[in-house]
Amino acid sequence: MNILGISAGHHDAAATIVNGQGDILFAGHSERYSKIKNDPNISHGLMQEVLQYPISLVAYYEQPFKKQLRQLYSGQGINWNKLTVKQILKEQLIGMKHIPEIKSYSHHLSHAAAGFQTSPYDKATIVVIDAIGEWETITIWAAEYDTFGKAVYKKLWKQLYPNSIGMMYSAMTQLVGLKPNEEEYIMMGMSAYGTRGFGDLLKARLINDEWAIEFKDNLHIGVKSDFMSHVEKTDMAAMAQDLCENLMYNVIRRAKDFNWSNNLVYMGGVALNCLANRNLGSYFENIWIMPNPGDAGSSLGAAALAFGQRINWHNAYLGHNIPGPYPVNSILDSLLHSRIVGVASGRAEFGPRALGNRSLLADPRGKDIKDKVNAIKQRQQFRPFAPVILEEYADQYFDMPSGWSDSRYMQLVGRCRNPDLFPAIVHYDGTSRVQTVPKDGSGIRELLEKWFILTECPMLLNTSLNIRGEPMVNDRADADRFEKLYGVTVLS
């Protein structure tokens, strides 16, 4: 029996297929096929991948009727074509001749399951923080497997619309001139250029109760353009980051106080804030963030709930496949000669971050490399890049936060111990968003090992193979287009 998990109809549409043994056969993002950033709908190309598998059950990631009631309450009105899962799937699953049995789950429970059922834990405390689901914006769960191996969830605490950490961060993203629900990660990087430590000024304007996470105003549609207009944009970004961390840690402390488990599973779009994630080890001994914690990852969460038991998680390489061996030697040749090269090989990453299979790689030691790669990607020059490093050398080069045994999915920042030696991967504040690579036999692992032998440098610059505003390269045709338009060799 194959289960198709779907998150679609609002933003970041995705599909996941799980078989009857709990194996993930496929998981992919709609935007990679349609080329529409954050595509809300299941695209034709993604459906073509899905239709390669016989499907016995479709699992949907939220409950539409409850969402429509909340949208009516918030003044958005009702979309009569999205009242039921059947209505939505009829629009989304174009090409599927017969839609089989359908199950649907609440938005936050799908987030929770995507994390817990892929985690290595038998018991965990789960925290979900995002913008909004149906009504919930924050939830805390106790999770464990029963004697039959079935995942059991108990909700311990919740906060409801319009009180939302995610909506606050999106409102501030819009205020500083960036695109909400898309460029929050850019504001996170911008915060390093502002003066940190003044989040209380923003808190005084926005928050009624920081422990209960209660806001003074509904930030769903943002704030007025003249809100705190005397504050520079970089300082506003820093304030927003401070406030986000303050509120997030209050939620984490509350979760810890339930004393359910020392294992934390953290999910929802706010879990992508790797700057805030650095301090999670102060509260929990073990931490797992599934590498696609936002809404797209909930396609896996819905499928996991329908399956009911632990999912066999191995890595995030779950999407479209470009067949053939990882081109290690060709990449090395390009790096040694031009210092920058693209790679599109194997299965695409499930999640927003490139982990070596759809990456732009470069030598992190050159003083001009950061500007060159930013120019290729058409990004703001202030934005940093991530290092990908042999896991056993990470502590030598970075001050890694406590509580994290690794950072395989680029989910936290660490302070670089020798920033002058690696200017291309160090941010203005001296930190780097680190990706560690274990001895897993992957292509990126073999590449780093050979690069280390040749250069005595155990790391490379790693960024996603795309330009600003476009989805990552998905197939070989995308790679050819990238080569032609941007003058960068892309190897498969």
Image (cartoon, helix red, strand yellow):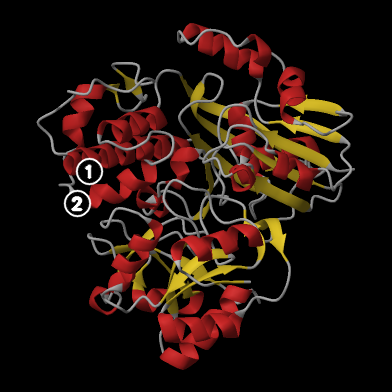
Q: Which mark is residue 238?
A: 1
Reading the image, the residue beneath label 2 is: 193
Marks 2, 1: nearer the viewer: 2
Image coords of residue 183 (percent x, y) = 38, 41
In the rendered image, is residue 81 in sight? yes
Q: Secondary structure at mark 2?
A: helix
Q: Residue at x 89, y 36 (%)?
A: 56
Name the quadrant of the C terminus.
bottom right
Residue type, label 1: Ala
Name the quadrant of the N terminus.
top right
Q: Residue at x 64, y 73 (%)?
A: 442
Residue type, label 2: Tyr
Q: Earlier in the sequence, mark 2 or mark 1?
A: 2
The residue lying toward the viewer, choosing from 67 and 82, is 82
Horizontal relation, residue 106 to residue 233: left or right: right
Q: Residue at x 39, y 78 (%)?
A: 363
Q: Is residue 344 above or below residue 352?
A: below
CA distance separating discs 2 and 1: 8 Å
Image coords of residue 371 (percent x, y) = 29, 66
Horizontal relation, residue 115 to residue 427: left or right: right
The residue lying toward the viewer, choosing from 380 and 88, is 380
- Contact (CB < 8 A) between labels 2 and 1? yes
Q: Is residue 488 above or below residue 14?
A: below
Q: Secondary structure at mark 1?
A: helix
Q: Quadrant of residue 97?
A: top right
Q: Which mark is residue 168?
A: none
Image coords of residue 247 (percent x, y) = 33, 34
Q: Residue at x 62, y 75 (%)?
A: 443
Q: Is residue 285 above or below residue 268?
A: below
Q: Quadrant of residue 241?
A: top left
**Label 1 crowd bin: few (<14), some (14–19), many (20+), radius 10 Å:** many
